[in-house]
């Protein structure tokens, strides 16, 4: 069955095109800095939003119909979602998808039944992957939706619930490996707390680390060669979440010896919720050698929660791609963890959302490459720190200097000059000049 009859294939038509079902910037074979756009930008569809979310919010039920012609919560519906998803990705030229276990099949109260359903659906997905060449970017286990995870999964107070979390991770890893996934994500859904009055933070953090260690050991045992990712988020659903931001998550991984197997999956909207820019989170990950993958979406400065909008901010996308290019690319990709606004409730809107997002990142890539080729930003930064290239500066960065020696140096100079100007406004002018 064909679900999206109104479009055959979304094509690149160039920036002057007024055809809403076309790309203006995403030209998959265009070569930028020696690599095809499609290689720079491994885009992924998020199973949960695109095939599952109907626009329900706290004040009302869904507005979009995602039944795909089948009765919901049945295996027939699960298969219809696979069909619709692969048609959708093929028509858009999206080469990857991301999933939670429970996005794929209706969850039973008995985990054995759920696991059987997962085996069945992943066989079907694998067939479709082979047919289309579409691949899995990453998988994950939803350990936050089911009521039993009310106190967390790795951070739960119930050893039995902890075992159910382990069982879900095991199965989600099996499927990720089966579908050739590049990565496996831990987003700490309810790994956090509401109040310290009832919380043993030390035990919770240690238990989360133990669960991650077991996941790594098992994953490597079954031949998973990809990266594990932590996706930081400061709050929501919990008031305090342990993986607050990249710096916190990286510190956690190092503390528990998990840093060799894990990288960051940075989500734009989570970055801003943490009071950072998207670019900040990317840079912190990159300088720690842990920039793995990206959940490419956008928040709203007026709203203090995770709105998961399709990204349209070219400035942000440019600075994101500037970080990605400078870091030498991602081991993961760009997952559109994004959903249509509630009143955008048709199949066409699903396409418009992804076209918008793909074009935003394609334009960001083009502009970031121009910034790099222009070279003025990098040149300025180099110059700003040039005092560390010789003399006492060189000695400092080589690690040979002592505090006494530096003190003697300062005392000998007596009075220093002001450091070089930061020239922020000049640099911002360069960005605007390249962007427009
Ligand atoms: C929630 C979120 C998740 C993760 C995967 O804010 O971003 O969808 O990406 O669990
Ligand atoms: Co996400």
Image (spheres, rainbow, N blue to C red):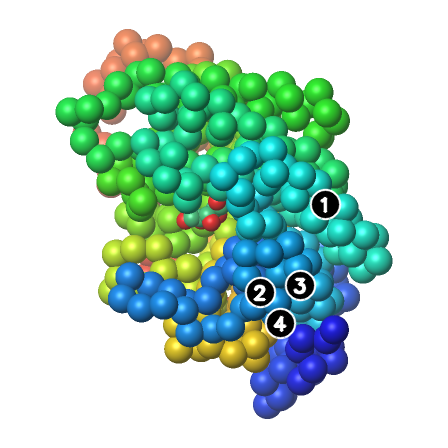
Residue wearing tag 3: 80
Say whether residue 60 is visible. Answer: yes
* Nearer-N-terminus badge (2/3): 2
Question: Contact, CB < 8 Å: mark 1 with mark 4?
Answer: no
Q: Toward which corner of the image does residue 205 lie, by quadrant?
A: top left
Within-10-Å neighbours for mark 3: few <14, some 14–19, many 20+: many
Question: Where is mark 4, residue-wise?
Answer: 69
Q: Looking at the picture, does residue 389 appear above or below residue 114?
A: above
Residue 49, given in percent of the width and then of the height, sits at: 51, 60
Give the Cα separation between the discs numbered 1 and 3.
13 Å
- From the viewer's perspective, is the residue at label 1 or at label 2 nearer? 2
Q: Are marks 1 and 2 in contact (CB under 8 Å)?
A: no
Q: Secondary structure at mark 4?
A: loop
Do callouts 2 and 4 mark residues in contact (Cβ within 8 Å)? no
Q: Is residue 311 visible?
A: no
Task: Give the residue drawn at x 41%, y 30%.
Answer: 153
Question: Given contact means CB atoms under 8 Å apart, are the residues at marks 2 and 3 in contact?
Answer: no
Label 1, ligand 1: CB separation under 8 Å: no
- Label 3 near label 1: C-beta < 8 Å? no
The alpha-carbon separation of the residues under discs 1 and 2 comes to 18 Å
Per the model, the C-alpha gap separating discs 4 and 3 is 8 Å
- Quadrant location of residue 309? bottom left
Q: Nearer the viewer, mark 2 or mark 3?
A: 2
Q: Earlier in the sequence, mark 1 or mark 2?
A: 2
Q: Is residue 310 above or below residue 274?
A: below
Q: Residue at x 46, y 67 (%)?
A: 54
In front of the other: 275 or 355? 355
Residue that carries the numbered disc 1 in the rendered image:
120
Res. 71 mark: 2
Locate residue 115, reporting x and y percent.
63, 37
């Amino acid at each position: 069955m064909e679900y999206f009859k109104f479009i055959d294939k979304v094509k690149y038509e160039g920036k002057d095109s007024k055809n809403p079902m076309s790309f203006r910037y995403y030209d998959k074979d265009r070569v930028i800095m020696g690599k095809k756009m499609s290689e720079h930008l491994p885009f992924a569809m998020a199973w949960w939003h695109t095939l599952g979310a109907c626009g329900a919010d706290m004040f009302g039920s869904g507005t979009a119909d995602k039944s795909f012609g089948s009765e919901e919560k049945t295996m027939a519906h699960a298969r219809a979602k696979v069909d619709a998803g692969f048609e959708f990705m093929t028509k858009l030229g999206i080469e990857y998808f991301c999933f939670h276990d429970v996005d794929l099949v209706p969850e039973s109260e008995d985990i054995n039944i759920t696991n059987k359903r997962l085996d069945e659906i992943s066989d079907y997905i694998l067939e479709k992957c082979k047919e289309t060449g579409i691949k899995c970017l990453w998988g994950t286990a939803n350990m936050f939706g089911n009521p039993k995870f009310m106190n967390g999964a790795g951070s739960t107070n119930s050893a039995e619930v902890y075992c159910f979390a382990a069982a879900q991770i095991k199965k989600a890893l099996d499927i990720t490996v089966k579908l050739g996934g590049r990565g496996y994500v831990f987003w700490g859904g309810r790994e956090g707390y509401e109040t310290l009055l009832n919380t043993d933070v030390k035990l919770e953090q240690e238990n989360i680390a133990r669960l991650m260690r077991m996941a790594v050991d098992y994953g490597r045992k079954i031949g998973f060669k990809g990266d594990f990712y932590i996706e930081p988020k400061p709050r929501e659903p919990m008031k305090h979440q342990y993986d607050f931001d990249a710096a916190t998550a990286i510190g956690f991984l190092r503390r528990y010896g998990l840093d060799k197997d894990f990288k960051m999956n940075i989500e734009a909207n989570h970055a801003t919720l943490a009071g950072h820019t998207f670019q900040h989170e990317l840079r912190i990950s990159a300088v720690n050698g842990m920039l793995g993958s990206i959940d490419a979406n956008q928040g709203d400065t007026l709203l203090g929660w995770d709105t998961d909008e399709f990204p349209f901010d070219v400035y942000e996308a440019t600075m994101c791609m500037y970080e990605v290019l400078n870091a030498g690319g991602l081991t993961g990709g760009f997952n559109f963890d994004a959903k249509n606004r509630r009143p955008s409730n048709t199949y066409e809107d699903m396409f418009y959302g992804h076209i918008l997002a793909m074009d935003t990142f394609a334009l960001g890539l083009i502009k970031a490459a121009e910034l790099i080729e222009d070279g003025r930003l990098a040149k300025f930064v180099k110059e700003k720190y040039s005092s560390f290239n010789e003399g006492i500066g060189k000695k400092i960065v080589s690690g040979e200097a002592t505090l006494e020696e530096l003190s003697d140096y300062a005392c000998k100079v007596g009075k220093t000059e002001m450091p070089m100007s930061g020239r922020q406004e000049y640099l911002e002018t360069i960005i605007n000049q390249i962007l427009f």
